[in-house]
Amino acid sequence: MRFLIVVVDGMADRPISKLCGRTPLELADAENMNYLASIGSSGIMAPEKTNITLGSDLAVLSILGYDLEKYYTGRGPLEAAGAGVDMNKWDLAFRCNICEIGPGRTILNEKAELPKEEALRLEERIRVACSKGLKDVEILFKHTLGFRGVLLLRGKMLTLNIVTTQPKRFASIPDFVPLERTEEAKYTAEILSRFLKISEHESESGKKYAVLPWGGGTKTNLPKFSDRYGFEAAVVAGVPLIKGIGTLCGMSVVDVPGATGNFDTDLHGKAKAALETLREKDLVLLHIEATDELSHDGNLEGKIEMIKKVDRMLGEVLDNIALENTRIALLSDHTTSVELRSHTNDPVPVVIAGGSFPRDGIEEYSETAARRGGLGLFKAEEFMSKLLKNTKL
């Protein structure tokens, strides 16, 4: 038996009044997603603690069956692993956003993408500036994909007991505030403030940018996926976060040229890579990022069109896979409201089909239809047990 998990990031949404109470997924009327629902079983998946809103880091780790309280140390280390940045015990790693800055240090765009050449020049300028006058800490900044980057702080006078905030559009650049009256907290806040100041620059177009670190964490050690489940797995993804999770879980990470994490991402290339990898591995996690980014942008039309593009990709997969010995799961890792432009804690629809998985009579893949499905309501941590139920490799 082979397994393909298709995670469409932030695809699930809330009913929208201008869509007559439907969600983008329901309006998209995705033919292949609906077909998958008709030959399998549906359900809705919720975070373990319904009073929290999960990011993709927490959500994907939960989907893969990892205990968050035991293994999660922050988003930064996952992003660092995805960027090929190795960490030591005392290191701190942060996710970074390149932001466009306006008057009064207002964030005009928290996802400002720089041309690759300009991003590399920024890396070098930060490297040179941070190497001067700092004896007790080493600073490494690496641009990863689009507006994303990773910051690594290496030294023994560092702490996570400081406030870092994920940048938000039209908010002011946040301060790095110590959470305790210690030399370590004061020093770490000063280092981050210095990094921020060094990163501020004006591009050739006249726009002003800064690199904002957030989501700090220490090195994490995840048990190997193969040790937990007894088979080999791979991940096909564009964004460093998901690549990092795969790397730390001991999965093979498949790079796809043209996988941008945006609307223009090469879905055909990702589908082809997933199908080819599935010939070698027992399980493949195929991750699609763009639906989440479009939701954060408030781009309703773009989100609907992206769901349709993903549906066409799914059709390509279904045309080239043997469902009698392959089990496919389709799900969103979390809900992202296109109206709120943020994640919510609403449960997400899941369908599992193929590989003799029972049918439950549901004919549509959507947030509403999945509530009537045979999988019922379950926690994200239970997903793998449902996927693997009554199977032998």
Image (cartoon, rainbow, N blue to C red):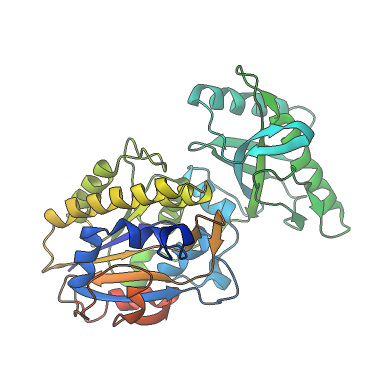
Q: Residue at x 75, y 54 (%)?
A: 163
x, y percent for residue 56: 49, 58
Q: How many marks?
A: 0
- Any part of residue 214 in sight: yes
Residue 136 appearing in the image: no
Q: Is residue 259 left or right of residue 165?
A: left
Residue depicted at x 65% and y 47%: 168
Question: Which part of the image, by quadrant, shows the C terminus?
Answer: bottom left
181 shown above or below 346: above
Residue positioned most to the top: 204
Q: Is residue 192 left or right of residue 388?
A: right
Residue 369 image position (x, y, % from top left): 32, 74
Q: For this rendering, which residue is in front, 65 or 360?
A: 360
Image quadrant where one finds the N terminus: bottom left
Q: Is residue 46 above or below residue 174?
A: below
Residue 100 x, y percent position in the rendering: 64, 33
Q: Who's the residue at 60% across and 58% down the image?
A: 74
Q: How far across and down, in percent of the image, does residue 325 sit?
A: 13, 68
Left or right? Give the position of 161 relative to 286. Answer: right
Q: Is residue 204 left or right of residue 366?
A: right
Where is residue 199, by image quadrant? Answer: top right
**Where, by quadrant of the figure, is residue 373 drawn?**
bottom left
